[in-house]
Image (tube, rainbow, N blue to C red):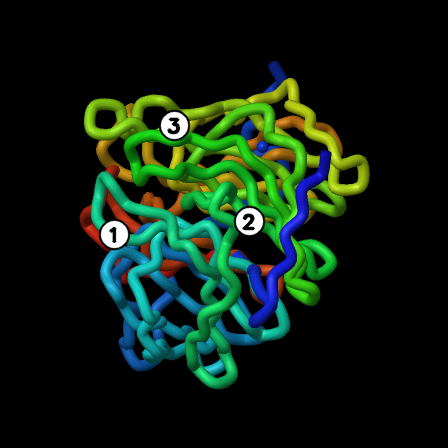
Amino acid sequence: MTQKYLFTGLGVLIIALGCSRKIQSSAESVSKQWQEVNSKDDSKPIARHEAAFVRVNSKMYLLGGRGIRPVSIYDALTQKWSLGAKPPIELHHFQPVVYQDNVYFIGALTGQYPAEVPVPVIYSYNTTTNSWATGDKIPTARLRGSTGNVIHDGIVYISCGITNGHIDGHQNKMDSYNIKTGEWKVLPDAPRARDHFQAVLAKDKIYVLGGRLSKAPKNTFAETIGAVDVFDIKKNKWETLKSPLPNERAGTMATLYKNQVLVIGGESIRQNPAHAEVDALNIKTNEWSVFPKLVTGRHGSGVVIYNNTLYIASGCGNRGGSPELTTMEKY
């Protein structure tokens, strides 16, 4: 039976994968490389990780992260960084969505490692007024953090997550939240639980890929997940692709770029430096290919697209919490 919750108050939410693996599948992948981006006035973003990077019009926003840190704003036209407002509470481990120039946060964590707790309400950041607002409460039974979020036709889809920081309470839940009406729906569970990942919308399907089952203190990084689960919005049904993520890792950044779902950077038990790899899943063939590596490996940030160019900023350079980066690069 479908469960429904109706919210009142501030409407919300936001913004913010055995097949063959082709190496350098296109001429574009071969010819282009990631390049460092330096501001015109030598300004830099505030270092942070377990945060997010989103775009609204010609400006890019670094939000959240451990501690209460002001928003860092990059203006693509002036090529300069500036500071925005501080969030009302510490917000980290989330994938935001953008709706009508507002950035919405659902499924975030707050507090210190390893026993962080889910944030019980939805927060939003208004990019026009540079102000934060508190929105609707999240149904208690559906509360968790480190979820994968996408928005489609004004409805936010919230997948998987974890309820007890980095310790336990791994979730395979799937929900939707209607920004206009405030209605919360419980959808079919995903085939498996995961945290520390990002979801990607491609047409009418949601790709849930990467991530792990965090089990601090002994197995925080070890149980990475290769399976790619896909939710068909129209059919209200899940499937698991035959082609798993070739290079399993968590803390990844992900986006849709030219009919390919990109899985960028991340962290794993296999190495101390953060991953610089960029894997690409062709949504037409379900085959994997490899894009050029990042200049600097990183995890715990986000990726945006502006003028057909990928941008990534901040994050962490090693597995775990340090060093936090202030660099930016593009592809």
Q: Sequence-wise, which precedes: disc 1 or disc 2?
A: 1
Position above or below: 221 against 205: above
Q: Sequence-wise, which precedes: disc 2 or disc 3?
A: 2
Seen in the image, is 292 located left or right of residue 89? right
Position above or below: 105 against 269: below
Name the amino acid, label 2.
Asn
Asked whether the viewer can see residue 326, the reply is: yes
Pointer 3 local density, CA inside 10 Å: few below 14, some 14–19, many at least 20: many
At x 51%, y 43%, the residue is: 142
In percent of width and height, residue 286 lies at 68, 28
At x 34%, y 70%, the residue is: 87
Asked whether the viewer can see residue 331, the reply is: no
Q: Nearer the viewer, mark 1 or mark 3?
A: 1
Pointer 2 local density, CA inside 10 Å: few below 14, some 14–19, many at least 20: many
Q: Sequence-wise, which precedes: disc 1 or disc 3?
A: 1
| Image quadrant where residue 206 sits | top right
Tell me the quadrant of the picture where the N terminus can be found: top right
CA separation, marks 2 and 3? 18 Å
Tell me the residue that label 3 is attached to.
Answer: 213
Disc 1 element: loop
Is 305 in front, or is 222?
A: 222
> Are the residues tagged 1 and 2 within 8 Å (C-beta)?
no
Name the amino acid, label 1.
Gly
Position above or below: 246 against 303: above
Image disc number at residue 149? 2
CA separation, marks 1 and 2? 21 Å
Disc 3 element: loop
In percent of width and height, residue 79 lies at 42, 77
CA separation, marks 1 and 3? 19 Å
